[in-house]
Amino acid sequence: MSLTTSSRLSLSRLLLLGLFLAALAAAFIEVPHPAAAAGSLNGADVAWMLTATAFVLIMTPGLSFFYGGMVRPKNVISTMLQSFVALGIITIVFYFVGFSLAYGDSWHGLIGNPLTFAMLRNVGTAPNPAFAATIPFVLYFAFQLKFAIITPALITGSFAERVRFKGYLAFMVLFCLFIYCPLAHWTWHPEGFLRQWGVLDFAGGTVVHISAGIASLAGAMVLGRRKTHLRNTSFSTPNVPFVLLGTGLLWFGWFGFNAGSALGANELAAQSFVNTNLASAAALIAWLLVEIARGTKPTAVGACTGAVVGLVAITPAAGYVTYGQSILFGVIGALVSHAAVHWQNKRTTIDDTLDVFPCHGLGGIVGMLLTGVFADKVGLIHGTFTTFGYHVLGLLIVVTYSFVGSWLLLKLTGRFFALRVKDHEEELGLDLSQHEESTYHIDEEFEKTYRRALLEPETV
């Protein structure tokens, strides 16, 4: 049973008090922050990683424009805020405990000790050779934080136009702690069991995109279909320039996402930088050609979607494949995702509003499997089955864990916080019903109707 209005107000006040007390603790509890010894840092690596970290941060505002341009005008602010708010929420969660769960002392390769790096304990300007030997460990934290931020933001596209903001905030925190952090530990911690198996994920195809895409599928199923989806009401993309702007910011930021994962200013960064651009370009062209081959006109939204799918597909392999292979990643990713978008929208009743599962989920899956095929020296084409086999096994584990875990967390969240807005709130639009904001001028007569809709929905 969801909380009453009075209970939610009490909980909000309790959370505000908790945040204040946590801030006091962070300010006055002394924790060790080891300083770098002379000559232990590489200046070029530090400069590049500071830049790459900023690149990855801009991806989340870029995502907000990308998603915001594809929803109805009455839901633009809400949709964009769902991405943007992760910059605040996940930063605090990752500072206090998330980073430690992902990268703290390993417990059987499954999860990190929550106390190892809590409140950045033992995280200072000194490098940590286990993770990055030439940059401050606190910079490594900052870089990984940006990955944690964008992952739950990606999920919002699946239940856009119908999710209650407070319920989403609760789910976002739970997802970060119970889905994202364990996956990051399995894949990127030196003792994580997937990494020990030899599963390769250069920049987050598994940790970020597969987890978000699978969670999106669970979210669409748990929240159910929008009223407009049930009525089969179609609409053209309201703000294509927003989509183009968002895509440009994502493409720009993705160079930090992938090339930054080399963790230094080196040849691996240059290789992954070029691979990133080639895959995205190839996917963009492939998506447009599919649109034309199907007898429709090439669209700006299609070009943008294809470009993003190419970026997703190359992410796990950016540092492990050749330039020509990266083009193949982009083309295959675009073909699979385009077919999946068409099938999902025409053959199923799943209301994945912005096609997060077919684009990010399947795009990430394609990238992960192709990494097992083409990875330098260890891929299937080099006559070695081991890496590909572990990629398949790892994929099954990650998909199962992400879907079941997200489903349970969504159900748990819905039990205490209503996840789905009421029918009249959905009709009114989430901008007004959730935030009392609008992209348009609200006159006095509309204000009265709005207030009455909230208080007496059956009379409007």
Image (cartoon, rainbow, N blue to C red):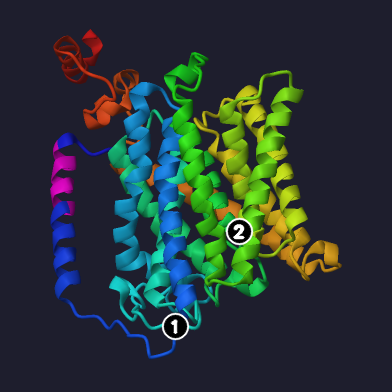
Precedes in sequence: disc 2 or disc 1: 1
Q: Residue at x 54, y 56 (%)?
A: 255
Q: Residue at x 31, y 46 (%)?
A: 85
Q: Secondary structure at mark 2?
A: helix
Residue occupied by mark 1: 41
Q: Quadrant of residue 450?
A: top left
Name the disc covering residue 5, or none: none
Residue occupied by mark 2: 273
Stretch of the chain drawn in magenta: 6-15
Amino acid at circle 1: Leu
Q: Is residue 12 left or right of residue 48?
A: left
Amino acid at circle 2: Phe
Q: CA distance from mark 2 to mark 1?
A: 23 Å
Q: Is residue 262 above or below residue 61?
A: below
Q: Count neighbours of disc 1 (C-alpha within 10 A) and say few if under 14, some if 14 to 19, many if 20 or more.
A: some
**Residue 322 percent location from the top left of the image:** 74, 60
The reply to whether residue 391 is visible in this rendering is yes
**Residue 294 percent location from the top left of the image:** 74, 22
Q: Quadrant of the N terminus?
A: top left
**Residue 273 percent location from the top left of the image:** 60, 59
Q: Main secondary structure of the magenta part?
A: helix
Q: Secondary structure at mark 1?
A: loop
Q: Count neighbours of disc 2 (C-alpha within 10 A) and say few if under 14, some if 14 to 19, many if 20 or more.
A: many
Q: Quadrant of the C terminus?
A: top left
